[in-house]
Image: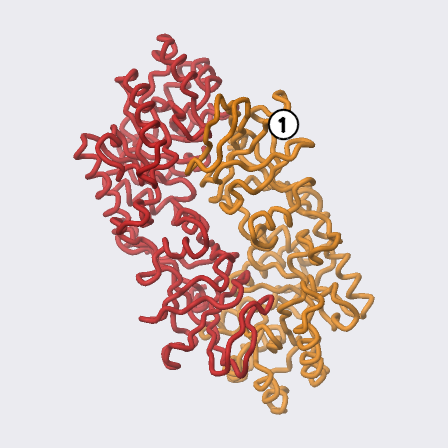
Chain colours: A red, B orange
Amino acid sequence: MSSACTACAVLTIDLDALAANWRLLNARMAEAGGECAGVVKGDGYGLGLAPVARTLFAAGCSTFFVAQIEEGVRLRRVLAEAAPADAAPADAAAPPVYVLCGLLPGTAEVFAEHGLAPVLSTPEQITGYRSLPADMRARMPRPAVHFDTGMRRLGLTVAEAEAFLDDGDAVADVDPAVVVTHLACADTPGHALNAEQNALFRRLRDRLPGARGSYANSSGLFLGGDSFFDLGRPGVALYGVNPTPGRRNPMRPVVRLSAPILQVRKIDGPESVGYGASHVMGAGSRVATVGVGYADGYPRALSNRGHGALGAWRVPVVGRVSMDLTLFDVSAVPEHEARPGAMIDLIGPLIPVDEVAADAGTIGYEILTQLGARYRRVFTGGPEGAAA
Amino acid sequence: MSSACTACAVLTIDLDALAANWRLLNARMAEAGGECAGVVKGDGYGLGLAPVARTLFAAGCSTFFVAQIEEGVRLRRVLAEAAPADAAPADAAAPPVYVLCGLLPGTAEVFAEHGLAPVLSTPEQITGYRSLPADMRARMPRPAVHFDTGMRRLGLTVAEAEAFLDDGDAVADVDPAVVVTHLACADTPGHALNAEQNALFRRLRDRLPGARGSYANSSGLFLGGDSFFDLGRPGVALYGVNPTPGRRNPMRPVVRLSAPILQVRKIDGPESVGYGASHVMGAGSRVATVGVGYADGYPRALSNRGHGALGAWRVPVVGRVSMDLTLFDVSAVPEHEARPGAMIDLIGPLIPVDEVAADAGTIGYEILTQLGARYRRVFTGGPEGAAA
């Protein structure tokens, strides 16, 4: 079916850049005596769980986080195939996979069967974990415990955390390998909540000397000296989104999204384009249509606001983004460049993912995780490069 | 892995409602002497191409439209399995599948191999179609031709259409089965462009008496008497979105999205919730967390704006929608109702998809086509009901 793909948008994923981003962040953690895990939830932030996880594993990443148990089951299979042949999947040597949604009712057998580690988030989950048969617990890596220091979303409240820490039997039974918290405002270094979360986490985490403290997300790794603890938990920065909004992006871009022009339309007089006739163009304008729309995760919020790039030219989105098609004003581009088949970058060197997000009124995380299933995915570099 | 799904959000798709919606719209067309096709692009508007197409086919739908050729290849397979055993896939009796993106360079062999019908959208595509070997053309259903009467997106301009119609050899060679246009403002009945598009299309279409005129999309089917032509082309209304914005929705809802509460958090004092500490709640409030976020297509734009329903209570989204999790204020719901495991409707009887879209600043089309891959899909009714 490859010949059909002349019409397809192409999503190019630079696995070497992904690996380099992990190594950069891991080096920051290593300076502070720690290391970095890899967060690969949301299908590897939209880029594909398997190639992303294989690349991070090959780069040296030895701890993974996912959101949901199904993601963990898939990841465990990927890692088993990537691991040396003599390592059993649930082997202690296998990279632990932590499931952030926790030990929800009815899921323990799945955790055990696939050698997944729960992130215990409520007193009930701790009680539930302690009540499991010892042989079932033995088939999971040691769990993590989640202390909520300011997100009020998942995790033990400070009072619940203290009750747990005061219960020596509970701590001994659970024997957490990792203690996790989640920063609410790490992308705003001056926010008062950062210092508050840091102090709370430090106090609680110090009572569990046998566990690694996992504190900093992507932006947290740039907050400064007391924010490292033991296990960094970067997600979005691995995939090229700027973890330091407003400052130069220290990460390498990982994603490029390019779509061929399907048709170029010359505008004869003042004419409206697209749904709702929301944009009027003058005579002599030219409009290029590409086969990408909001069904591909290119947000409708980019209507009359987004930009693409055709060669060295920035070309504005005109009219409403529709389900399968988006229009660009290519009037400023020479006709021999803006022709059917020419590629327009929707994300690329001139159009960083952070700009696309800002134009759409959102953040790079949402742009990445919504990248559509209809794109032809091309992997460059990394362990996939040869196979692609 | 079913036991893992206690944490999953459940997307319930009512195939009986889908079939009823198609029949309702088809009956409107039948009164005017025409019939309705089914538009199933974007993976059946996010609900699943295969079950959607099988349901529409079983309801009597005998013409289908997709956007991209890969969608056509998939659909042809689905329809071949659904067709009587004695009908060959590319049989003249098989329902024609029109590919709206057109006959792009390099794709002719795929059209022929899979018995797909191109929607010819440029003079170059018409020339290309005419230059194909006769035996290759014979393996495709008769094509459609797309006249652009006001979208300025895809299709022949009026001048190009007239040049084509003036060329008797070209018309005889192409022998279109369908002539298509696309309405820009059908959801705004009073918009001047509606009358303009109607008059243009009627004039062009009348010169092709051997072709069926396909004019009205979902909203177009409610524009009135001169908007029916021969072949209705509804998409979004089939899936329950209101084709008559501002008026009562004549369609049956098709989708329900429900997610179990993972955790309920009591707020002790004035405390912020979620990323960016964007919402502060008072002492005594309760917040419920569900495992659905923008990676599932639940838009981040619903942060502090959306609503769910827990039983008979409407519960507002509080804080920012995050990648895998969303928070709801359940303070008004009795504690024994708002407990872990209780289901919150994100789309449902109290929360129509059109309301979700309005809260997110978009349209139902985008909400549907972004419905996420992590949901557990449950089909009720229709030909799938027994298999589900």
- Whole-percent x, y for residue B264 in the image: 53, 25
Disc 1 element: loop
Number of marks in picture: 1
User: With B333 as the anchor, is B283 left or right in this view?
Assistant: left
**Closer-to-camera residue (A207/A99):** A207
- Residue drawn at x 70%, y 83% is B203
User: The C terminus of chain B lies in which quarter of the figure?
Assistant: top right
User: With A336 as the anchor, is A323 left or right in this view?
Assistant: right
The residue pinned by badge 1 equals: B332
Q: Residues within 10 Å of mark 1 (few under 14, many from 20)?
A: few
Q: Considering only vertical position in the picture, is B291 above or below A128?
A: below
Identify which amino acid the numbered label 1 is placed on.
Answer: Ala
Q: Considering only vertical position in the picture, is B366 above or below A266?
A: above
- Whole-percent x, y for residue B321 in the image: 49, 40
Residue A193 image-quadrant placement? top left
**Closer-to-camera residue (A122/B100):** A122
- Residue drawn at x 46%, y 73% is A288
- Whole-percent x, y for residue B206 in the image: 72, 83
- Residue drawn at x 50%, y 57% is A301
Whether residue A84 appears in this view of the structure is no
- The answer for which chain carries disc 1 is B
**Closer-to-camera residue (B128/A337):** A337
